[in-house]
Amino acid sequence: MLPVSMVPFSKEDKILIKSMYECKGYSTRQFITEFPDKGWTKNSINMLLAKLRKFGTCNFCHFRWCNLGQILNK
């Protein structure tokens, strides 16, 4: 089996995933279908969401420091 190249999450990606998961209840499948150009895998999103559920944060996911509107309008 060939290794799958994993695209690391950017700071903006982490903020987007956290907010969509918490505010809109997005599932892993919804992230993949909503943002196909990002190259995210099911496993990578699941790992990030598990970290978010366990620790309440996923590094750099601090709403008070970031403007989600700017990220979504890119």
Image (cartoon, rainbow, N blue to C red):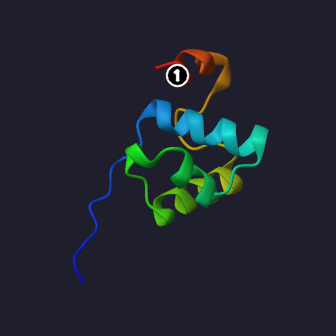
Describe residue 27's horizontal placement relative to residue 25 as left or right.
left
Circle 1 packing at 10 Å, graded few (<14), some (14-19), many (20+), is few
Label 1 residue SS? helix
Residue corresponding to mark 1: 71
Q: Is residue 5 above or below residue 3?
A: above
Residue 41 in percent (x, y) is at: 44, 60
Amino acid at circle 1 = Ile
Frontmost residue, 33 versus 43:
33
| Count of number-bearing discs | 1
Q: Residue at x 33, y 50 (%)?
A: 7
Q: Is residue 65 above or below residue 40?
A: above
The single residue placed furthest to the bottom in the displayed view is: 1
Quarter of the view holding residue 54: bottom right
Describe residue 56's horizontal placement relative to residue 68 as left or right.
right
Frontmost residue, 74 versus 49:
74
Q: Residue at x 57, y 33 (%)?
A: 15
Residue 23 in percent (x, y) is at: 77, 38
Frontmost residue, 54 versus 47:
47
Quarter of the view holding residue 50: bottom right
Residue 9 in percent (x, y) is at: 41, 43
Q: Is residue 71 above or below residue 21?
A: above
Residue 55 in percent (x, y) is at: 67, 50
Q: Residue at x 70, y 54 (%)?
A: 53
Image quadrant in which the N terminus is located: bottom left
Q: Residue at x 57, y 50 (%)?
A: 31
